[in-house]
């Protein structure tokens, strides 16, 4: 697996609110523009999704894929790995939320390997676009919620 691409954003909301939006997979198509559909296939004893199927269209990367999620015991981070995909052969990623009170810093890390050859520089650029778009959408979604 190649090195991950990482980016950070500050959101005017408590970490718990940010994590609640991250955990609400069925709502992703409303704020994550690349995500076209989501289906939660399994959940843990706390009701958090453990296996989720996505259909994504991110310009050069279009795929239907399934991810397994692992939630941190402190409820401040979640990581995932690819179970299966059409054009992806591997994906690892994570959201980590830090902060107190009414401000959070969110770090998104993503590494994707495709079944088709892609120059590393182009792969990192595509990952960066996916991350930046997701973080901006997450910020809008969290900060616009009542």
Image (cartoon, rainbow, N blue to C red):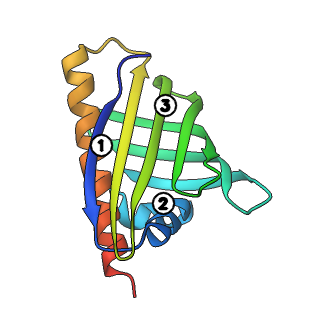
Image: 101 above or below 50: below
Residue 106 numbered tag: none
Mark 1, residues whose alpha carbon is within 10 Å: few (<14), some, or many (≥20)? some
Residue drawn at the location 39% of the way across and 75% of the way down = 101
Q: Quadrant of the N terminus?
A: top left
Location of residue 30 in the rendering, given as x and y in whole percent from the top left corner: 40, 67
Q: Which residue is mark 3?
A: 92
* Pointer 1 or 2: first along the chain: 2
- Is 21 on the left-hand or right-hand side of 124? right
From mark 1 to mark 2, how far is it between C-alphas? 15 Å
User: Which secondary structure lies at badge 3?
Assistant: strand
Q: Which residue is mark 2?
A: 22
From mark 3 to mark 1, how far is it between C-alphas? 13 Å
User: Which secondary structure lies at badge 2?
Assistant: helix
Residue nearest the observer in this picture, 19 or 40? 19
Image: 17 above or below 61: below
Of labels 3 and 1, the one closer to you: 3
């Amino acid at each position: 697996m190649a090195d991950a691409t990482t980016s950070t954003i500050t959101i005017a909301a408590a970490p718990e609110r940010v994590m609640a939006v991250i955990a609400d997979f069925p709502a992703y198509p409303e704020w994550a523009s690349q995500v076209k559909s989501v289906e939660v296939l399994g959940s843990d004893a706390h009701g958090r999704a453990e296996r989720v199927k996505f259909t994504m269209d991110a310009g050069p990367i279009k795929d239907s894929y399934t991810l397994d999620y692992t939630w941190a015991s402190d409820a401040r981070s979640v990581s995932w790995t690819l179970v299966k995909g059409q054009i992806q052969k591997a994906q690892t990623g994570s959201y980590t939320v830090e902060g107190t009170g009414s401000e959070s810093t969110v770090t998104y890390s993503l590494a994707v390997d495709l079944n088709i050859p892609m120059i590393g520089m182009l792969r990192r650029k595509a990952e960066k676009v996916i991350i930046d778009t997701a973080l901006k959408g997450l910020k809008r979604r969290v900060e616009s919620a009542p």
